[in-house]
Amino acid sequence: MVKNEQFKKNFIWNLIGTTFNAFNSLFFMVIITRINGLEDAGIFTIAFSTACILYMIGIYAGRIYQVTENDKSIADKDYIVNRIISCLAIIIISIVFVIIRKYDIYKSSIFIILATYKALEAFSDVFYGIMQKQELLEKAGKSTFMKAFISVIIFTIIDCLTHNLVLASFSIVITFLSIIIFYDIKITRKIMNKDTKVVANNVITIFKSGFFTFAIAFLGLYITNAPKYAIDNFLTEDIQAIFGIIVMPATVMGLLAQFIIHPYLNEIFELYKTNQYGKLKKLLYRIILVIFGCGVICSLAGYLLGTQVLGFIYGLNLTLYKNALLAILVAATFYTMAGIISPILVTMRYTKIQFIIYMAISIMEFLLCNILVSRLEINGAIIAYFATMIIYFITFFIVSMFIINKKQAISSKENQ
């Protein structure tokens, strides 16, 4: 009874926190478009997307790997030190990136500040992993909610007063840093083992053993953002902003997978550990069916009302992009369904095969985006996005079913 009650708390607060965090980028884009204009919105779009990709470097193997890791010799402190190193890498890489791209000081500042914000978010996640292992995911959800809610409020106030995107963006960094110090670290210190010492070899082991988990997460996010880099190469900041606006609902939909899968991580791991592959498949089917149903509803609503609603929110006329929005939402449904399958394969430690799939799809999409965007402009970006997401889901579904069925057959033979 107590366990079920805690699961409900964990699920609800994880849902609230992740939902608010998912909508943060939407709120930021609305504020910037209305206060600063389309050009700043375009800069923010590509800078935020890049920061999100770099975030994958920060979380590296990620919370899924941390929570389901069997090696008891790796302590919480080892994960924290590992995360400090990976988060510092985000900031260094962002600086190198803007130098290579030869951005001006203004655009570079926004890139580096948003990368720092995502580095702090990645740092928070290691504490959330420690909380989740102690069945305290609700604490992580509350932390995520506070960061998301407060950062939007302060960002809005500062941008309204100054019309300065650099100062407004920097306020997010201050908000996250404050909550990490006064909430995340405070909670974590109460529940983690203080007697353990950091072992350098363990920190290195996390980097080594988690490489493929990191690589597939990194490439997975690149797949959703590849069209934006093609737009950055061939088109204007205004077009970047328009694409960012119509793809925003898809981004939010993709994050749906996170708050659906996180509460089930322990159950998935238990089913895998006890060779209950039949139940694992049923759980996977059930989650995919829920996402598909949500996707159908969102796609229909988006086609009928999406451009009007987005146009009202952003103060723009988006009527010409009605079909484009429908294509994006359908594609996002397939992306979200595939996004559920990948963590299950990570839990089963099937990461190398995923890395190969992601590499192949990333290369295909890179070529597709650059060819189509250079010829068809924004329509080329939408076609490339749509085709990639369909291929992404089909490939992952076929591979996952093959692996789970194979495991189930082996398990059945051993039990005979």
Image (cartoon, rainbow, N blue to C red):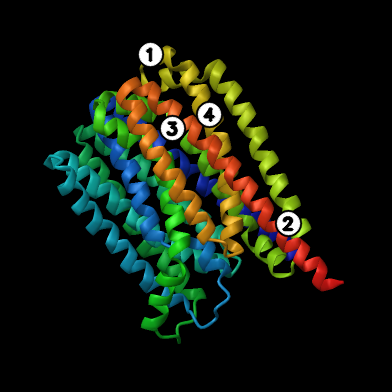
Most foreground residue, 220 or 185: 220
Q: Earlier in the sequence, mark 2 or mark 1?
A: 1
Q: Earlier in the sequence, mark 3 or mark 2?
A: 3
Q: CB atoms at circles 1 and 3 under 8 Å apart?
A: no
The mark found on residue 248 in the picture is 3
Relative horizontal placement of residue 8, taking residue 339 as reference (left or right): right
- Image height check: is 237 above or below 338? above
Residue shown at the point (47%, 18%) measured from the top left: 307
Q: Which residue is mark 1?
A: 317
- The x, y position of residue 259, in whole percent, is 57, 49
Query: Label 4: how many residues lie within 10 Å, few (<14), some (14-19) or many (20+)?
Result: many
Does residue 30 appear in this view?
A: no
Tell me if mark 1 has few (under 14), some (14-19) or many (20+) residues whose alpha carbon lies within 10 angstroms of its own: few
Quarter of image, res 24: top left
Q: Is residue 307 left or right of residue 34?
A: right
Which three-letter amino acid code belongs to the residue tagged 4? Leu
User: Which residue type does callout 2 highlight?
Assistant: Asn
Amino acid type assigned to the residue bearing label 3 in the image: Met
Instruction: Quickly name the residue at label 2.
Output: 405
In this rendering, the answer to whether 388 lies above or below 174 is above
**Disc nearest the viewer among 2 and 1:** 2
User: Which residue corresponds to the image point at 40% horizontal and 16% vertical from the top-left?
Assistant: 318
Q: Are marks 3 and 4 in contact (CB under 8 Å)?
A: no
Seen in the picture, residue 291 relative to 78 is either above or below; the reply is above
**Residue beneath the point at 46% across and 67% down:** 210
Q: Secondary structure at mark 4?
A: helix
Query: Viewer-proximal residue, 303 or 392?
Result: 392
